[in-house]
Amino acid sequence: MRPPASFVRAMRSIIYIVSIGLLVVASHPVSAGIPGPGGNEVPCDFVTGGGFIVGSGSPASSLPAGAKANFGVGGGVKNGAFWGHLEYNDHSTNPPIQVHGTSVTGYFQGLNGPNDRIITGTAQVNGTSGFTYRVEVNDIMEPGRDADEFTIELFNPPTVPDVYHAGFEYQDGPIQGGNIQLHKANPSNTPPPDFTCSAGP
């Protein structure tokens, strides 16, 4: 049974605040899990995906009813550092809202099942820097259309409340095209020093 949406949103905010706090305190990227002893080289899984979502008309979402937003996303760790990318285009505005990820700062397991992953990072919005993002993706089944989940939140400055949010957790439903794919670890998927990965499926 999926946790209530209010609980998921509360936990999501807590995770985001803690990750930003760790980033400031430690002065290096947030962990993909729980800090562990130094030299841990246990590989992690990683996630990739692309497709589009359509606004449901819910007042909870920044995406208007019927509006289409495309995305391409990836996240995980590679060779001792966080790895990933984000491209997101909301076509409901003129000009469109264009989000370009510039770094990945965290990779976590989400609360909505074993294939749910959270990626945090920094981004430019329409060419302007200073934004951070939180993307949650869930690989529900193959193929992903009408099943897999994508949620995006943008922050500027990098604190709550967010300045833009859309996707599954904001009642826009699952993706309407494309696929989310959770990949098994390979030897290159080692985390940053002194961090371990969240438990995978």
Image (cartoon, rainbow, N blue to C red):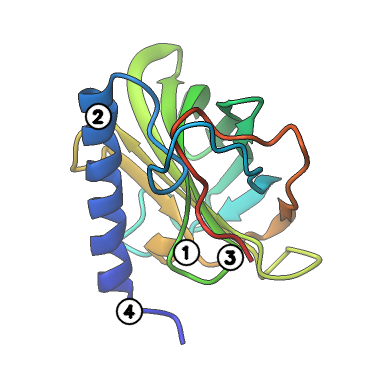
Q: Viewed as shown, does residue 22 lie left or right of 173?
A: left
Residue 125 quadrant: top left
Q: CA distance from mark 3 to mark 4?
A: 17 Å
Q: Viewed as shown, does residue 37 lie left or right of 190?
A: left
Q: Nearer the viewer, mark 2 or mark 1?
A: 2
- What label does residue 174 carry, if any? 3
Q: Secondary structure at mark 4?
A: loop
Q: Earlier in the sequence, mark 4 or mark 2?
A: 4
Q: Earlier in the sequence, mark 3 or mark 1?
A: 1
Can the viewer see residue 42?
yes
Q: Which residue position is annotated with label 4? A: 4
Q: Secondary structure at mark 2?
A: loop
User: Do tag 4 and tag 2 residues touch (Cβ < 8 Å)?
Assistant: no
Q: Nearer the viewer, mark 3 or mark 1?
A: 3
Q: CA distance from mark 3 to mark 1?
A: 10 Å
Q: CA distance from mark 4 to mark 2?
A: 26 Å
Q: Which residue position is annotated with label 2? A: 158
Q: Which residue position is annotated with label 1? A: 56
Q: Earlier in the sequence, mark 1 or mark 4?
A: 4
Please name the residue shown 42% across and 38% down the image.
Answer: 31
User: Do tag 3 and tag 1 residues touch (Cβ < 8 Å)?
Assistant: no
199 or 135, nearer to the observer: 199
4 or 195, nearer to the observer: 195
